[in-house]
Image (cartoon, coloured by chain):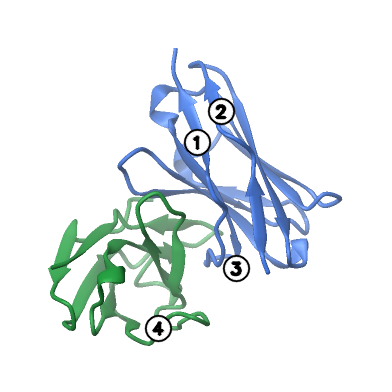
Chain colours: A blue, B green
Amino acid sequence: QVQLVQSGAEVKKPGASVKVSCKASGYTFTSYYMHWVRQAPGQGLEWMGIINPSGGSTSYAQKFQGRVTMTRDTSTSTVYMELSSLRSEDTAVYYCAPGGVWLLRYWGQGTLVTVSS
Amino acid sequence: QSALTQPRSVSGSPGQSVTISCTGTSSDVGGYNYVSWYQQHPGKAPKLMIYDVSKRPSGVPDRFSGSKSGNTASLTISGLQAEDEADYYCCSYAGSYTSVFGGGTKLTVL
């Protein structure tokens, strides 16, 4: 069955960067696109972007353009999401979710990123 | 990319039916038959309940159904059960490999 293992919780200072990983197993890594979604405390889901693990192409939500970078390592079936210039509003749980271009079929367990001075 | 509009909360008694709406624009909900719905219980990751407007993944009860008319999609849950109490989010494809979520709806089973 599909398994997604995300990296552990992070605490960062404002202005720093964070890189969250998501290791996939149980399916052919290049068969599904990978979405990243975040959820601030007590708030709703926010779509951040998508990466095609096959070729590495990406598409990001306008809000995160210039601040987010999604990459993948096919040798380890792992995708990464790096967010830079962190501010307190970036405190959230970050999820990876493989699926189709418009479909988030499975979800990781989430990674809490806390931005605090 | 503005968030899709959902009611903040809905409620119903066990056995009843409830419908959650999700309103977007012709650039997202109205432009594609790629609306999906996710259920999220407190402290848990979301779970896919409906995709491509009205399709159910394996394992999702047929009490859950989806539809769309114009720029508004809907999720209907019939025969409400206590375990259906959760937050529900719609999501639509918005073109150019982008997607957008709704603000979420809290379902209370009375």
Marks 1,2: beta carbons within 8 A: yes
Q: Residues within 10 Å of mark 2 (few under 14, many from 20)?
A: some
Kindly state the secondary structure of the residue where label 3 is placed: loop
Inspect this view and state whether residue B70 appears.
Answer: no
Q: Which residue is mark 4?
A: B61
* First reached walking from the N terminus: tag 1 or tag 3: 3
Disc 3 to disc 2, C-alpha distance: 28 Å
Query: Residue B110: where, in percent of width, then height?
Result: 13, 68
> Quadrant of residue A28 in the image?
bottom right
Kindly state the secondary structure of the residue where label 1 is placed: strand
Q: Chain of mark 3?
A: A
Query: Residue A47: where, in percent of width, then height?
Result: 46, 50
* First reached walking from the N terminus: tag 3 or tag 2: 2
Q: Residues within 10 Å of mark 1 (few under 14, many from 20)?
A: many
Inspect this view and state whether residue B41 appears.
Answer: yes
Amino acid at dot 1: Leu
Amino acid at dot 2: Glu
* Label 4 and label 2 in one chain: no
Q: Chain of mark 1?
A: A
Q: Nearer the viewer, residue A71 or A8?
A: A8
